[in-house]
Every structure is written in C-alpha cells, then in structure tokens.
Amino acid sequence: MTELQRIEPPAPDAGALAPYQHPSMPSQHYAASASAPNTRRAYRADWTAFTAWCEQQGCAHLPAQPATVANYLAACADGDADHPPLAVATLERRLVAIARAHELAGHPSPSKDEWVRTVLKGIRRKRRAAQRRVAPIGVTVLRQALAALPETLLGMRDRALLLIGFCGALRRSELVGLDVSDLQVVPEGLILTLRRSKTDQEGEGILKGIPLGANAPTCPVRAAQAWLKAAGIKEGPLFRPIDRHGTVRSKRLNGSDIAVIVKRSVAAAGFDSDLYSGHSLRAGLATAAAGAGAPTYTIRRQTGHKTDRMLEIYIREGSLFRDNVVSLLGL
C-alpha cells in the first residue's frame, strides 16, 4: 500500500468549511434542496467517517491528498475486525461525498486524481470477480411460485406482492413504500405512483404502468384488488404484516420482509431459496423482457435504469438462448 502523505490540517477559515455547514446566504435554502434528504444524510455520514479515519491516521482531510483518499478506499474495501468490507456502491458514494466537500470548500477534488480512479477501478474488478449475483425470477419460476401459494389471506398478499414487484420491476424500498393511494385503476391496468425512488432525486414521483394480465392467476391487477378486498384495506400502506392469528397489521412491511417472502415462495415451489433474494423480482423482469426480445428502451422505461450499460448483465443473460446458433444445427 502506498505510504500516506502526512500534512498538517489547515486552519479553519471561511473558505475551508466542512460541507453542509456553508455560511448562511439567500441561496442556502435552495442549495440544501438540491439532493434528496436521504442522500444528504448519507453524504454527511460518509464525510464524518472519512474525517474520523483521517484523524486516526494523522493526515489532513480538507484538503486531502489523493494518496490519502486512495488508501482510505482500500481500507474500506478490505475492512477489519471491527468494520466489514464496504460494497462498491458505498465506496463510490463516499468518494462523491469527499469530492463535494472539497468543491464546497473551494479545493480541487481528489476524486479526479488518476491514482484514486485506478484504485477504485481495481476494487470494482476484484469485487466483480468474487461477487455472487442472485438469480432472477423468470416467468417459469414465478408461475410455479404463484401456484404454490396457499389460498389464504397470507397467500393473497404474497401473490399481489410478487406480481406487482415483478411487473413493476420494483426495488424493495419502492415495493414496501407503496400506499393504496399510489394505485390508480384504469381500463388498461394499474398506474403506480412511486413517491420515493432511488432514481428520483428531485422527489417529483415516478409513474409506472402495470397492464392487465392475460390469465387471472398471474394478473397483477386482479391480485392487488383481491388482496385489498380480502384484507379490508382502504388507505395507508399497501403491503402489511399479518400476525399468526391472521390479523392484518396497520404498519407496512420492511425491505427485509420482501426477501423472506421471495425465498419462502420459491422454496414452496421446489427451488433453491439460497439463489434468490428481494432483488430477484426486479432482475427477473429485466432478464425475462430481454429474453423475449424487448427493445432496451422499453425495458429501461419499466425498470428506471438510466442507460443500457446498467441493463447489460440482464440483457446478456436473457439473450443466451434467443437466436442461438446452436439451435440451427438440428442436434
């Protein structure tokens, strides 16, 4: 590991204030609204973690030397006895927080340094080689999982959750964040309003269409309506816990509950639950759509991905057997 360059922290002044503590001015209110509240909280926590690490290492954090930032990323990627290794996405967000702190204080961003970018690229490559991706829930698996659900209130909830999550290509947070008022029934199906989404930093809300299914057992619209009627839910959270007495609670499910429901459903259908997670529904829609030959722009419209690059892994897996040359050989 490259030896850290130790320099004394600069004396605090108006031009070297930590981010999110900028002097009061008329534009401060709008600047603070540039990012979603959760994003700002994450950046504050990331900056606090970086400054604490720099203090332990005895090196400056503002401005930070590129070698300091590179070594910090490496330390976070490796982890230690007290801190588990951080995910690449978390490291990238921490680097953004460090960059914004420097820019707000009038310093060059160390994130643009070639050595820092090379270290992060190396971390990505190493992690990608060791990463185990969860299996996407394809149409066949989904059908069998739905068929295995019990004809109970719990089964009705899980049917609606699996179908809405799959057809909407929803993240776990988006799925559990749905309220009854976010569903609008139209002749073509359902219009979902996502009030909270990872890709909606402006908080404007995202609309997604869920068409009527051709078959009643796999129709997401009928499933959602049946669940709401059976549970007697007219407002508030759409998907809720059900206790052992069959009572529907008033609170909403949390993100970890989605993984439990997915794993339980595929296991009941005879599949290995260890291969699946809450992300399998979203990944499943993208993979299945790619396998069916859907244009990438239509897949992105449903998943919310910004670019085809983000869809690449799903498209590649979904297209393995479509127009495969081996099929032409008559074996």
Image: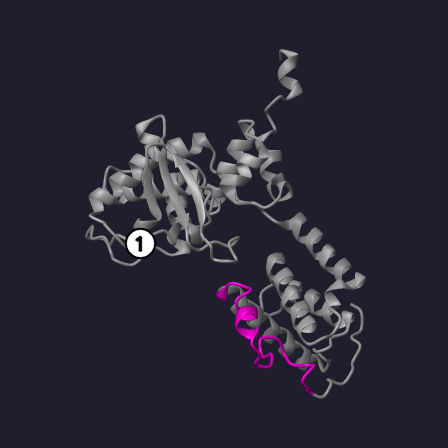
Q: Quadrant of the N terminus?
A: bottom right
Q: Is residue 200 magenta?
A: no
Crowding near pointer 1: few (<14 within 10 Å), some, many (20+)?
Answer: some
For image coordinates 68% across by 78% down, the residue present is: 54
Q: Is residue 139 above or below residue 249?
A: above
The residue nearer to you, when weighing 157 against 198, is 198
Viewer can see residue 276: yes
Quarter of the figure with residue 186: top left
Q: Which residues are magenta?
A: 12-37
Coloring basis for residues:
one colour
Quarter of the figure with residue 191: top left
The residue nearer to you, when weighing 315 against 82, is 315
Q: Secondary structure at mark 1?
A: loop
Tell me where residue 181 appears, x and y as whole percent: 31, 50
Tell me where residue 298 appears, x and y as whole percent: 54, 35
Q: Is residue 179 above or below residue 159?
A: below
Q: Is residue 191 above or below residue 52?
A: above
For image coordinates 78% across by 82% down, the residue present is: 7
Tell which residue pokes out farthest to the top in this image: 330
Q: Quadrant of the C terminus?
A: top right
Q: What is the three-letter code of the residue carrying label 1?
A: Pro
Tell me where residue 277 appears, x and y as whole percent: 46, 47
Q: Is residue 15 magenta?
A: yes
The residue nearer to you, when weighing 222 against 23, is 23
Please state the total of marks drawn on the protein image: 1
The residue nearer to you, when weighing 306 against 155, is 306
Tell me where residue 170 appears, x and y as whole percent: 45, 46
For image coordinates 55% across by 29% down, the residue present is: 294
Magenta stretch: dominant SS? loop
For image coordinates 60% across by 41% down, the residue present is: 311
**Which residue is the site of mark 1?**
237
